């Protein structure tokens, strides 16, 4: 079940806590008389669930419009950047970065519940087996295990700035690729008996850096390489001993277009990566895919319209 933008996908970005309610403070008058010029402190009460969600809904609608509009017509270093797909934004703000699509049904039920906890706190309480509002619908949807905790969800390994630097793509004089994370050894998709693709993102900004790492389902994703920030392109590649053999604009978190696929190829070439032996697959809307030889792209600078 996907949460669409029209259904307030980002309602999980909620306040860290509910405003304090001093219900434990006695309401009896103080024996010390207040000066007429001193006002009594205002007493706050906790907002109702409806009031809390109404405020959150207004804030999130504004946030979504800002988020989607910031990069649309931007100029300068962030020109051409595009953000994470809406269905994955809650993954970024979840403290444990649980996989966005699997968060969707939990998010929907949390939104309809009477809980005043933010989404992550509510989900963490479920993980501990605590009773929370909305537990019955979760049981009906078979989203809980026999012990009352949520079904297993992969937790993303989001890289901090230090680890991102270790995953930055580097190129030697022969056009072969490596990273500090790989101990400066040439990258290779052949890992034992398995052939694993590398995920990559190209950062927005004045310097377009390429971050890459082996795509291991349940551990990392395109979003985890850059903490969910906007990119100018993303995709995957296979390589043998530092030579890219196949490059494709595939990413569920960012869904790069044909135009952004071309941006990827140009960025790799501009950094000196040898794509002469690569097969470039450019996926459009749906499942149609255009194949181009890397050598042809280099000679003709062929662009997919």
Image (cartoon, rainbow, N blue to C red):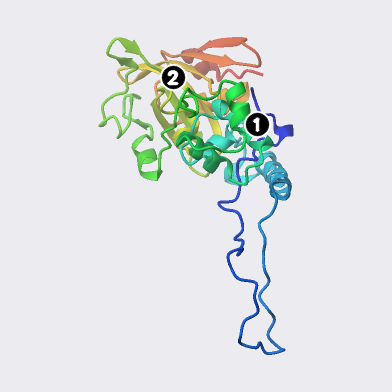
Which image quadrant: the N terminus?
A: top right
The percent position of residue 114, horizontal first and vertical second, equals 66, 41
The percent position of residue 7, horizontal first and vertical second, equals 72, 33
Between the C-alphas of marks 2 and 1, the distance is 35 Å
Q: Kindly identify which residue carries mark 2.
A: 237
**Residue ID at (66%, 87%):** 34
Left/right placement of residue 180 relative to residue 47 reads left
Q: Nearer the viewer, mark 2 or mark 1?
A: 1
Q: Nearer the viewer, residue 26 or 304?
A: 26
For mark 1, give the secondary structure.
Answer: helix
Left/right placement of residue 58 relative to residue 92 reads right
Left/right placement of residue 139 relative to residue 72 reads left
The tag on residue 98 is: none
Q: Does label 2 or label 1 sit earlier along the sequence?
A: 1
Left/right placement of residue 171 relative to residue 138 reads left
Q: Is residue 37 above or below residue 109?
A: below
The percent position of residue 147, horizontal first and vertical second, equals 45, 26
Q: How crowded is mark 2: few (under 14 residues within 10 Å), some or many (20 or more)?
A: many
Q: Kindly identify which residue carries mark 1.
A: 108
Q: Which of 198 and 38 is in front in this view?
A: 38
Q: How crowded is mark 1: few (under 14 residues within 10 Å), some or many (20 or more)?
A: some
The percent position of residue 216, horizontal first and vertical second, equals 40, 22
């Amino acid at each position: 079940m996907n949460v669409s933008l029209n259904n307030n996908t980002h309602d999980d970005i909620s306040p860290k806590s509910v405003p304090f309610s001093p219900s434990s403070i006695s309401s009896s008058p103080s024996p010390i008389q207040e000066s007429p010029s001193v006002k009594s402190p205002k007493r706050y009460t906790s907002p109702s669930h409806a009031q809390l969600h109404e405020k959150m809904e207004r804030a999130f609608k504004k946030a979504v419009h800002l988020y989607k509009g910031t990069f649309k017509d931007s100029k300068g270093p962030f020109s051409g950047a595009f953000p994470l797909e809406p269905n994955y934004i809650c993954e970024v703000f979840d403290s444990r970065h649980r996989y966005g699509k699997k968060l969707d049904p939990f998010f929907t039920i949390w939104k309809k519940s009477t809980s005043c906890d933010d989404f992550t706190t509510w989900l963490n309480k479920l993980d501990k087996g605590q009773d929370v509002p909305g537990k019955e619908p979760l049981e009906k949807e078979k989203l809980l295990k026999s012990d009352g905790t949520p079904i297993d969800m992969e937790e993303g390994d989001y890289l901090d700035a230090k680890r991102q630097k270790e995953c930055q793509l580097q190129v030697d004089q022969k056009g072969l690729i490596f990273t500090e994370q790989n101990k400066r050894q040439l990258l290779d998709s052949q890992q034992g008996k398995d052939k694993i693709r590398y995920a990559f993102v190209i950062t927005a900004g004045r310097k377009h850096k390429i971050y890459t790492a082996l795509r291991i389902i349940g551990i990392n994703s395109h979003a985890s390489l850059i903490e969910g920030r906007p990119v100018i392109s993303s995709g995957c590649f296979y390589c043998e001993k530092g030579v890219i053999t196949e490059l494709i604009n595939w990413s569920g978190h960012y869904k790069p277009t044909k135009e952004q696929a071309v941006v990827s190829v140009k960025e790799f070439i501009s950094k000196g990566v040898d794509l002469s032996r690569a097969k470039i697959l450019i996926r459009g809307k749906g499942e149609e895919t255009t194949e181009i030889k890397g050598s042809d792209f280099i000679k003709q600078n062929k662009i997919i319209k």
